Every structure is written in structure tokens, then in C-alpha cells.
Image (cartoon, rainbow, N blue to C red):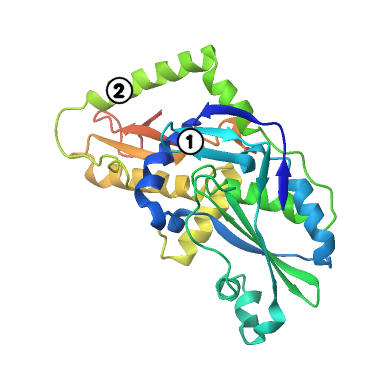
Amino acid sequence: MELRGPEAGPFPLTWGEGNMWESMLAFGPRSNRLNPAGISRVKHPVRVRDALPRIERDLNQFDILRATFDEKRVEQTFQGQARVGVLVCDTSVFPERGRELESGGLHTFLGAGFPMAAFDLCEAPIRIGLLHLDGIITHLILLLSHLPFDGAAYPLLMRPLLAAVEGREVPAPGMRTETLLQYEQSAESVRGSDAVIRRWIDTATRPRPGRGLMSTTVGRYSMIALRSRAAAIAAQVLAVRTRTSTTSVALAALTKTIHRHVDRELSAMLLVCNNRWQPQLKNFVGQTLGTGCCRFPRTTSAGTCRPIPG
């Protein structure tokens, strides 16, 4: 599948991409464990031959899908042409695993040879799979690189793609990555970022020496797993309601719990979350990961803390 658009760049990484850069490079072949992936049912009958051009038209709206990254210069370029791989698989070849497929699991398709290896910096940061039965598509699968995409971007890309495949009206895309880059490089944005960073440094260095939870080291990536099904559902509901990610919800709960129990010993925390609370980023199909410093003031009640956006 070919994607085409105006060639642009090279550009520096966005703020979110920059926060993921060292982790992705350090993980190398193991960075595939970070990549957002999922499967969705196609509810309206559509043949593979009809779906492919619809997918191609929809994906051409997103300039980030034509981005390639230069490891030495730490920059990205939007290519004039990019190739996206689409694996088409007939589910009749493994009918014994139909129940897994119906439950939304990826097991069936992974067994059919869908490439799950880490993304190369020079390939399109998306892989697509189509499951069909007698030429009628039953499921759509997406795998995204975690460098240009965060977890919240996955449904923002999947929803219009499903609409396109089923022949429904496709919603207008949010901010383009090139637009975000131009904004982040503007004089006004740089001044604002410098002011926030100065406040962050001031807050991070103010607490007296002592115990604290610090950020992961360069090349390491922290991950949260919710073992409780009820907690996972609650976090997802809150994430949808607040237009943020489940990770941000879990971190907020963790921060409040730690503050309540170890406030006497803890001075500050450095958190990794996204900044989709900003209106212009709520529909942005890209990476919004950022760093924040959360200070625990000793003069306030145990239920409050002061977040400093990074």
C-alpha cells in the first residue's frame, strides 16, 4: 500500500517523541513490547478488494505515517512516498481458534505470520492486518510504533479507519504532526516551555535531600500492569471520560496513594504521562508523552499534591 504527500523536513523530534527516543533505541529489538496493538471487528460486510483502497485513502490523511527517523541526527523527515504493509489472512485456515478471535484476542492472527518485530526507524510506523472469511473482512488489526504514537493515539487512528473500511463517514483528523512541530518551534511556544522548565527545575531542586521516587534512567521505560479486572475497567472509564490515557489515570491514583501513606518520607516524584488534557491535542494522532514533577508539600493535607507539567 502506497502513501503519498508533500515531502518536508528534516524536523527535530516533537516533545513527545523526544521523551521516547532513548528508550526505543535502548530496547532495540525488544522495543516491540511497547508498541500499541489491537484488533477490532468489522461490523458491516465489505470485501477485501473494496477495503484496501478505502484504507489507503484514510491513511493518507496522516503525515506521521510517512515519517522516517535519523538515528545519528535525531530528527525526522516526512517522505513524499511511504509503503505500508498489509497482511491479508483467510480465517478458514484455522477454524479451531474461532473463539479466541471472537473474544478480540490477537492469538489467531499472530499465528498466521503477522510481523510483530520492532519497527525500523526507516519504515512506516504502522502495520495492518485484515482477517477475512470467503473474501468478506471480519476483523482489522493495527500495530503501531511507540516512537511516534502513544497509547491514546491508537483508538484515534482505529476509529476513522474502521469507518473508512465500512464505507461510513470518516471524521476529520486532528492536528497534524508537522503543525505541532511548527508550534513547538515557534518563539511563543519556546518561551512558554522555558518558563515551565524553570519552574520544574526549581520545584525538583527545592525539597531537602531524602527519600524519593525518581524517574527511570536513560533507556529504561516504566510500565504499569493492572491485575484487577475491576480496576482496569474503572481506569478505562475514567480515561475515556477525561479524554486522557489509562496510564495517566493509574499514575494519578498511585500518586495520591503514595502521598497518603509515605508523605513524611517522600519529597517529590517524577512522573511520565501524556498531555492530552490540552484541547489542541485531544484528537492528535501522535505521541504526547511528557515528564512532570509532582511535589509533596509538607504543609498541606494528605490528599493534595501540586503537579508541575514538563
Q: CA–CA distance between discs 2 and 1?
A: 19 Å
Label 1: which residue? Answer: 16
Say which of 191 and 294 sits in front.
191
Please name the amino acid that badge 2 sits on.
Answer: Ile
For residue 95, which quarter of the picture? Answer: bottom right
- Quarter of the rendering occupied by the C terminus: top left
The residue positioned 76% from the left and 47% from the top of the image is 58
Q: What's the residue at 73%, 52% (across, down)?
A: 161
- For residue 307, side relative to residue 269 (left or right): right
Q: Is residue 228 above or below residue 234?
A: below
Instruction: Look at the picture and state if 15 lies above or below 113.
Output: above
Q: Nearer the viewer, residue 113 or 260?
A: 113
Q: Is residue 271 above or below residue 168?
A: above
Question: Residue at left 78%, top 58%?
Answer: 52
Picture residue at 72% right of the left edge, 38% below the top:
173
Q: From this viewpoint, is residue 222 visible?
A: no
How far across and how far down the image is residue 180, in percent? Answer: 59, 28
- Can residue 58 be seen here? The reply is yes
Q: In the rendered structure, which amino acid carries the disc numbered 1?
A: Gly
Please rate how many residues cluster around mark 1, counting C-alpha atoms within 10 Å: few if below 14, some from 14 to 19, many from 20.
many
N-terminal of the pair, mark 2 or mark 1, is 1
Residue projecting furthest to the left: 209
Q: Residue furthest bottom?
A: 96
Tell me the SS state at disc 2: helix
x then y, percent, for residue 188 = 53, 13
Question: Which one is in front, 209 or 230?
Answer: 209
Q: Is residue 16 left or right of residue 221?
A: right
Residue 82 is tagged as: none
Q: Which mark is residue 201?
A: 2
The x, y position of residue 148, in whole percent, is: 53, 42
Callout 1: helix, strand or loop?
helix
